[in-house]
Amino acid sequence: MKTPITILTAAIGLAAFAGRAQLFIAGVQIGTRPGAFAPEEFDSSKSGRRAVTWFRHAGDPAWGDSRTDYVDRFSVVKPVDGDAAGRPLLVVLHWRGAGWPGKGVDMQTELADDKDRVFSAPDDFYILNLDDIRDYNVLLNRTHDQYWWGATPLYAGPTVADVPRLVKGETPCEKRVLASIEWTIERYGIDRDRVYLCGNSMGGQAAEAIGLNHGEIFAAVNANVPATVWFAAARLGFVNADGSPRVDTKGGPTAEPPFLVEWSGVDDKWSRDREVMLAGLRRRHWAHIVLWGDYGHCGLVSEARRKNDLVEKFDWLALRRNEAYPVFTEASCDDAFPWPFAVFEPKRASFSGWKGDIESAKMKIAEGAKSVGQVNAFFRWRVIADTDREFAIELRLASPGELATERFAPPERATATVGVRRIQSPAIAGAKRLAWSFGDRSGTVERDESGTLAIPGLELAREPRVLKLATAVR
């Protein structure tokens, strides 16, 4: 019987761990006050070889939140060799485990030096662990309107019913996340061209929703088993207010989106509706690598690789915000997408009056799809030139040895529609019409209404071939 625990938690606002906890009784806050965003240091700890500093802050009325009389916190995990300016930053959004004390930002901070996690980072990185919990209070977590990183107050996550609100723009939680990142960048002198965002489960869906909207901040985004699709689909303009697909390519982010890596489980009830996300990415020609396997709602890289050994084989943390990257769609080497699922006989759990999760369900993947697969995982590239006179990028297919895969047979050749984003040359990036050449093929291409380049039918091989772009003369 869970009722006594719930009552105790609601009554005293059960704190996280003793060293980083504050007690909240009858709405009294300890140590902070409402007002402008001004985090204060309040604790330190260790994560493996790394030092950790903890900060807390009150809500900022400028975020438009329904209430600002709460305390939030975050941790900054230092590089192994200590503080130094000009380092990269990995921002981490935690899973829903934060519904219970110690299972969210605390746990992910303690695991920051664990190399088997999607939120681990190379030794020279700073790691910013943000918190979705409020006042360390379990009951409040399940009822405030900025739960699920701003997506919904529902314990079971966002649904189509949340879309009309989410399509309107930034949520207060999103503004808090961005303010925390900017504050951290300034305090530690972070390299602004190497800021990355990742999340697991609840944090994965928020990483897509928030991260892909802010290409002016993030170099790349990694979403591990993102739970539900509607927050991202709404915020990115992939769907209309009623949840139907938005077929035009207008709207959405104003900056070039970050590169996305995503991996989901085909036997994971949280991954239903992933086809909505992939369809939006393809329509907009946004760069993505999508992997799947029958590893469930898995957060361990080693466990996922037992089913799909391409997981985390692409070095997404080597991408830079100030460097161009290619976009591949309609590739002949893509596997058939296993979504939409046929979901039937779902069993829904109940949590003391809150709408509960689908606890279990019988599912069937899309006809013709495999339980293990990939989209765009075989492509590799290198920028050669990015000047006002010419842009050149080397494109190729990865070799079997490079991928170290036993489950896939990387192709020797493949065709794809190819575009390029984040070109740094103002002359080429701003040109409506461009001349292109690739091997023995050449032609001209015009940007679509959203400014996107897409050259269909290019053939790639394991041997590098160079795609060149230059301003076209009519």
Image: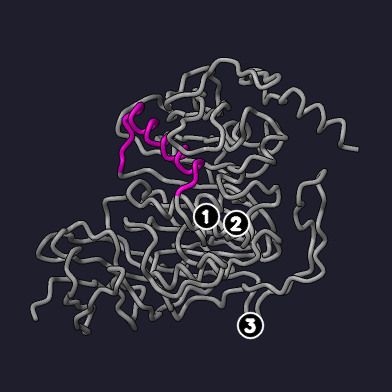
Circle 3 SS class: loop
Q: Amino acid at mark 1?
A: Leu
The quadrant of the image that shows the C terminus is bottom left
When the figure is inspected, residue 255 is found, relative to residue 153, above or below; the finding is below
In the image, which disc is placed on residue 166?
A: 1
Mark 2–mark 3 distance (CA, rounded to whole Å): 32 Å
Residue bearing mark 3: 368
Q: Is residue 113 left or right of residue 459?
A: right
The span picked out in magenta is: 170-192
Q: Amino acid at mark 2?
A: Asp
Residue at (34, 44) in percent of width and height? 194
The colour scheme used here is one colour
Residue at (38, 25) in percent of width and height? 83
Residue bearing mark 2: 162
The secondary structure that most of the magenta stretch takes on is helix
Q: Position of residue 109 (x, y in %)?
A: 57, 32
When the figure is inspected, residue 318 is found, relative to residue 24, above or below; the finding is below
When the figure is inspected, residue 124 is found, relative to residue 437, above or below; the finding is above
Q: Is residue 393 left or right of residue 200?
A: left
Please identify the quarter of the rendering in which residue 336 is found: bottom right
Contact flag, marks 2 and 3 (Cβ < 8 Å): no
Residue at (32, 57) in percent of width and height? 254
Q: Position of residue 260 (x, y in %)?
A: 45, 58
Q: Nearer the viewer, mark 2 or mark 3?
A: 2
> Which of the marked residues, 2 or 3, is nearer the chain's N terminus?
2
Contact flag, marks 2 and 1 (Cβ < 8 Å): yes
Mark 1–mark 3 distance (CA, rounded to whole Å): 34 Å
Q: Nearer the viewer, residue 304 or 88?
A: 88
